[in-house]
Image (cartoon, rainbow, N blue to C red):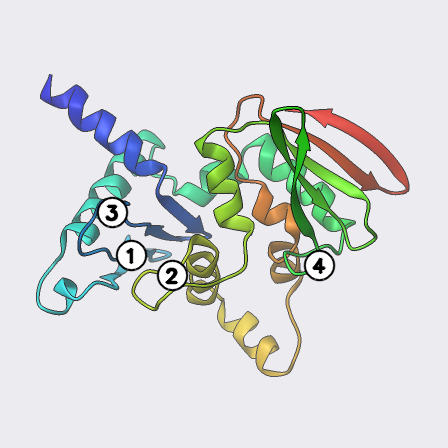
Amino acid sequence: MDTMANQDSIERKLERVAFHRHAVALMPDALDPRPGIAFLVEGQKSGVLQRFCSCDISKKRSCDHALALSRIYKQWKKRLKEKNFDDDFRSSIWDEFAQILGENCRETLDSVRIDFIKAGNAHSLKVFGSDGEEMFSYLSDGVDRERFLERCEKEFGPAAVPNRAAVLARLALMTLTENERAMNGRGFEARRQMLEKSFWHRARHFSGYPVMALISSYRGCRERYIF
């Protein structure tokens, strides 16, 4: 019984996990009186490279946020047979889909517009490109839509508890390669960075069950997909 309860707790915490490449963060629980965001960066060869948290407690000792993230990390690595979150995702159809659309689309989080459109008693979430054309409709109105908005909204929030978009931006900086840092210093970006800045890269982490309709411009053809 305890094992099942613990597993359920891990699954619920996964909804608060954000990841980018080989770095992972745990967003705070809404009811946490002393919130903080725990970060974990995986070394390329020797497992965990660093683990820290933004809360005040972590300055003195290991906090509950960091310990919880470590437990999730170990459980998930075991489930994925030692692959990390990003390795698992990159082997999925969702990443392939984002790569195809991102390759031919220059839309970023800054160039798109997200609106709620009223239809009867319901409000659907739609994303419009810089040309004003609808490119994405989110059909679900569950908690997964909230996570989508958190990923795609503008970066904001205090240093201790920024929003998910700001956390993802920080994870991106933490996982830059030496070559990418050198290119950035000269005013350039690597191809992988450009793909990761696309709207489709940020939108790719959806839930895996029918939640959306996508209307995409791909090589001049507009097609509709339901997932």
Residue type at mark 1: give it.
Ile
> For this view, does 216 lie left or right of residue 118?
right
Q: Residue at x 8, y 68 (%)?
A: 60
- Read off the residue under disc 1: 37
Viewer-nearest of labels 1 and 3? 1
- Read off the residue under disc 3: 69
Q: Looking at this view, name the residue that lies furthest to the top.
A: 1
> For this view, does 225 lie left or right of residue 208?
right
Marks 2 and 1, how far apart in space?
8 Å
Q: Secondary structure at mark 1?
A: loop
Residue type at mark 3: give it.
Leu
Marks 4 and 1, how far apart in space?
28 Å
Q: Looking at this view, name the residue that lies furthest to the bottom.
A: 186
Q: Secondary structure at mark 2?
A: loop
Q: Quadrant of the N terminus?
A: top left
Q: Nearer the viewer, residue 44 or 217?
A: 217
- Read off the residue under disc 4: 111
Q: Quadrant of the C terminus?
A: top right
> For this view, does 36 lie left or right of residue 157?
left
Residue type at mark 2: give it.
Pro
Q: Residue at x 59, y 34 (%)?
A: 94
Q: Are the two marked residues, 3 and 2, in contact with CB atoms closer than 8 angstroms?
A: no
Going from the N terminus, do you reach mark 4 or mark 1 first? 1
- Read off the residue under disc 2: 162
Q: Position of residue 42 (x, y in %)?
A: 33, 55
Marks 1 and 3, how far apart in space?
10 Å
